[in-house]
Every structure is written in C-alpha cells, then in structure tokens.
Image (cartoon, rainbow, N blue to C red):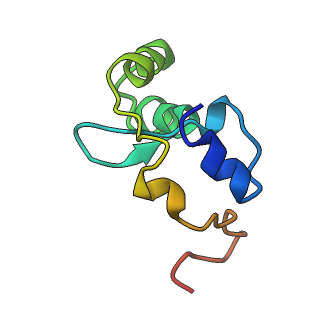
Amino acid sequence: TWGTMAMAAVGVPAGPLLEVAVHATDGERYNIGDLVKAYVDEKEMYTEEECEDYFRRDMAFPAENHAAWKLEFCPPCQPGESKYG
C-alpha cells in the first residue's frame, strides 16, 4: 500500500514486491526481494525470515506524498545497459 497510488499513476502494477522501505543503516530504499537478495544471498548476514521481520517491523516506509514517489518510473536495464548511459 505504500506508494500504491503514485505507482499506479505511472502504470506500475501493485504488489508486495513493490512495497518500498528505507534501510536505517545504509539509507537505501529496498523492496522485500531486494533486501533478501542483498542481505541473505549476497552478504550472507541474515536469514530470509530475519529480513522479512526487519522489513515489516523496523524499516521506515515513505508517506504516500513522499518525493520518492514523484520520480518517473524507469524500467530495469537490459543486459549490457547501465543507468548511466
């Protein structure tokens, strides 16, 4: 539900993977899939259950009118592309 209206406005379907929260330590924005990938798969610091608990209980969710939701939706880069051109 966080940012659902803003994402729907730019044509992004709603769903649990699109719920975005801010990590208190590194200040990065993550959805649950990205958080698990970063801290379970890549860094091997936590279990998937620990990440899900942290995501739901402790991470800050931006308000519906937060500036992050006003950013233009950018589709994922294709293999060989980068966000820098």
Of 33 and 41, nearer the camera is: 33
Q: Identify the residue at image location x=54%, y=35%.
A: 2
User: Of 61 and 23, which appears nearest the observer?
Assistant: 61
* Number of dots carrying numbers: 0
* Rendering quarter of residue 43: top left
Q: Choose between 73 and 34: the one closer to the eye.
A: 73
In terms of depth relative to the viewer, which is nearer, 82 or 75?
75
Q: Is 47 displayed left or right of 33 in the figure? A: left
Residue at x 41% of width, y 47% of height = 29
Quarter holding the C terminus is bottom right
x and y percentages locating residue 20 in the rendered image = 50, 40
Residue closest to the far front: 65
Q: Is residue 41 above or below residue 54?
A: below
The quadrant of the image that shows the N terminus is top right
The residue shown at (64%, 44%) is 5
**Residue for point 50% across, 19% down:** 48
Rendered location of residue 74, percent (x, y): 64, 67
Q: Position of residue 63 (x, y in %)?
A: 42, 40
Q: Is residue 78 left or right of residue 57?
A: right
Name the quadrant containing residue 55: top left
21 to 55, vertically: above or below: below
Furthest-bottom residue in view?
A: 85
Looking at the picture, how far across and down is residue 50, in whole percent?
A: 41, 15
Q: Quadrant of residue 22?
A: top left
